Image (cartoon, rainbow, N blue to C red):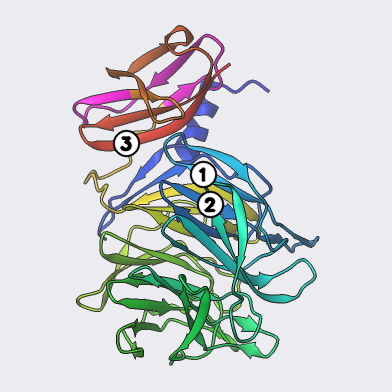
Amino acid sequence: MILQKSHINSILKVGFACFISTLTFSQGQWCKKASFPDVARHRCTAFAVGTKTYLGGGHINSGTLQTFKDYWQYDPASDSWSQIADFGGGERYHSAAFSIGQFGYVGGGENGELEYTSDFWKYAPLVNTWFPVADLPGQPRRGSSSFVVNGVAYVGLGQSDLGYEADFFRYDQSADEWIAVDSFIGSPRSGAVGFGNGDFGYIGTGHEFGSATKDFYSYNTLSDTWTQLTDVDTTLRQDATGFVINGKGYILTGNNTSGDVNYDDVWEYDFTNDTWTQQTDFPGDGRRYFASCVIGNKGWCTGGTDGTNLKDHWMFDPEMSLGFEEELLSPIVWPNPATEQMNIELQDILEFEDLHVEIVDPTGKILYRTAIGNLLILDKALFGGGIFVVRISNGSSLLFSEKIVFE
């Protein structure tokens, strides 16, 4: 099939551009990146180690039942995915995950035999190997929540054969053992959001018996006590995702109690004032089971489902607020892949100054940089064949990033 330029323009605007927000809420920016390369699925597990993110597991349960054990590494520098060793515990979905130092940890969840599990595994990227660690105590479960505070991980909640759980455990990495801490004071639940900040862990939303929730709590790791805080919005929400960036907490997406309404809203939490502020909506499809993790000051969010399994991959950077009143930069990159020449066409650039384009190789090395006007023609002779990333910036602000291929 041959695509006309008008079709390419439409595809790129929806699929590849960075979305610059401007509503009356605080502004942020989402950029769509290279999609997860394998089968779309949901209830995946994500974690970050160093400068890479990792995603795997998950399942399909519409019309067919399939549970996955494959895991993949994403490299933001090259906007590319590569498969790593399969999860050590086999097929698994709705597991808990966290990172400490140079290791990622994944455990619990439901396996391909429809059994809840409690085994935990440590992934070492340097040797691409999963190592078994101590099992999580208590009932085997799926849908647990986790947070890391001062380099110490905490895991709890979830759904077991006995119903919903409220217990919590601290992981002693040096001794490879779990230690029970004060149980969660909210209702037992699964699919809650967890993240850590300062000396505190935080848990919010999730699914309790018969209903989604909107309550939010902090756990003081120094006094081993829980405190209820301000609710997250007024909307009952389960199977959302969340993280902390630049000292602010974020909870986003998810769905309602009956599962027939999927959300695309984003809420920012002020830890000092115990207040929530709505941000610009996520520009993709509303969904549940968005898998997320953080590298530095950026969130990386992948997949989930809105009734159809998804595998799109997004970067969230709340500091990239450009303050424009509309989406102004939607380049047309064509053809892509290219055999000899590739065109980068900008239609609306009057509001921008100092626009530059960079071509970056898979290691992050800048191969080419130049100012750009309405049209730039790239010649294969400049770089040779291969996969690269084109980035367009306005001063220090990244406006567009996308993978390109010269065959």
* Residue 348 position within the rendered picture, expressed as x and y whole percent measured from the top left: 30, 28
User: Is residue 341 inside the magenta stretch?
Assistant: yes
Residue 19 in which image quadrant? top left
369 is higher (above) or lower (below) than 141: above
Q: Circle 2 — which element?
A: strand
Number of marks in the image? 3
Please state the extent of the stretch shown in magenta in the rendering.
Answer: 332-357
Answer above or below: position of 364 versus 227: above
On the question of residue 4 being in view, the answer is yes
The tag earlier along the polypeptide, 1 or 3, is 1
Labelled disc at residue 54: 2
Kind of residue at disc 1: Tyr
Q: Label 2 amino acid?
A: Tyr
The local crowd at label 2, few if under 14, some if 14 to 19, many if 20 or more residues have their Cα within 10 Å, is many
Residue linked to disc 1: 74
Q: Residue at image x 59%, y 89%?
A: 209
Q: Is residue 288 visible?
A: no
The residue closer to the viewer here, 102 or 149, is 102
The secondary structure type at the circle numbered 1 is strand
Coordinates of residue 302 in the picture (x, y in percent): 52, 53
